[in-house]
Amino acid sequence: MNIYLAAGVRIVFFGLLALPANAMSDADDACISQLRSVGGPDGASGTILSSEFSEAGTLVMLRDAGGTVWRCIAYKDGSIGELEVVEGADDGGGAMAGSGNAEPTTNTQQVRFKPGTSGTEITASLSSGSSTRYVLGAKDGQFLYVRVAPKSGSLGYLIYNPDGSALLDFMTPDKEYRGQLWQSGDHVIEVVNNGSTDASYNVIFGID
């Protein structure tokens, strides 16, 4: 178990053996830094619950000082792909007391299909004003399918080509997208919560 403290001092434990701070990975450090940045007073200290490496990115689970559990995905270069609350704690006035008042954020998540499939469905939530950029690799000539299905809140989405140009301007979720691509590379589907309250949704992606 890794314990990190507000003053930038870390005490790293594994079982009963104390390990040097450099036993932590760059992904652990990146997730801690991001939580300190967005987690308010409670995010300044806490505990790393687990850290699981994979080629797709390291999954780090953290619990902040207020008891809120966070899920973080970080990459080898130290960048953050995703940071979200998976178990909120109401401590009567800390960072997670009324998580709907959190500052707007923009997260990035790499979309991968299971072997042998051509699509996937993701369930997620967004605080007011926040967005998630889903990155999906595809080739020129393939067809992209996107459907955003809100469970609550007010949402919209945009699609960008690999060169950053707009493939689809802001679209409301009552309209799904299906179209042929003309560039190869990472396409970005950005889901935006443009309402005044938190929103939850499913988003479905397909490539054929």
Image: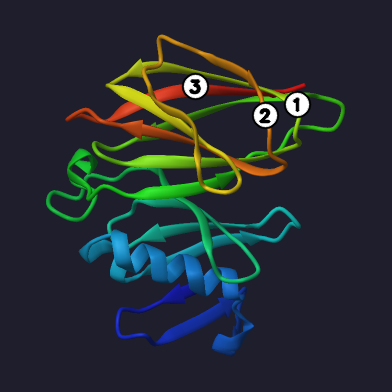
Instruction: Tell me which label, 3 or 1, sits earlier in the chain.
Output: 1
Tag 2 near tag 1, CB within 8 Å: yes
Q: Which mark is residue 181?
A: 2
User: What residue lies at 33% left-to-right and 71% top-to-bottom?
Assistant: 45
Q: Looking at the picture, tell me which residue is in the foreground, 33 or 172.
A: 172
> CA–CA distance between discs 3 and 1?
23 Å
Residue drawn at 23 percent across, 42 percent down: 99
Q: Is residue 109 above or below residue 66?
A: above
Judge whether residue 1 can be spotted in this image. no
Q: Which residue is mark 1?
A: 142
Closer to the camera in the image, 36 or 166: 166
Q: CA distance from mark 2 to mark 1?
A: 6 Å
Q: In what quadrant of the picture does the N terminus appear?
A: bottom right
Residue 102 in sight here = yes
Which residue position holds label 3?
Answer: 202
CA distance for labels 2 and 3: 23 Å
Which image quadrant is residue 98 in? top left
Q: Tell me which numbered mark, 2 or 1, is placed earlier along the sequence.
A: 1
Amino acid carrying mark 3 in the image: Asn
The residue lying at 22 percent from left, 50 percent from top is 103
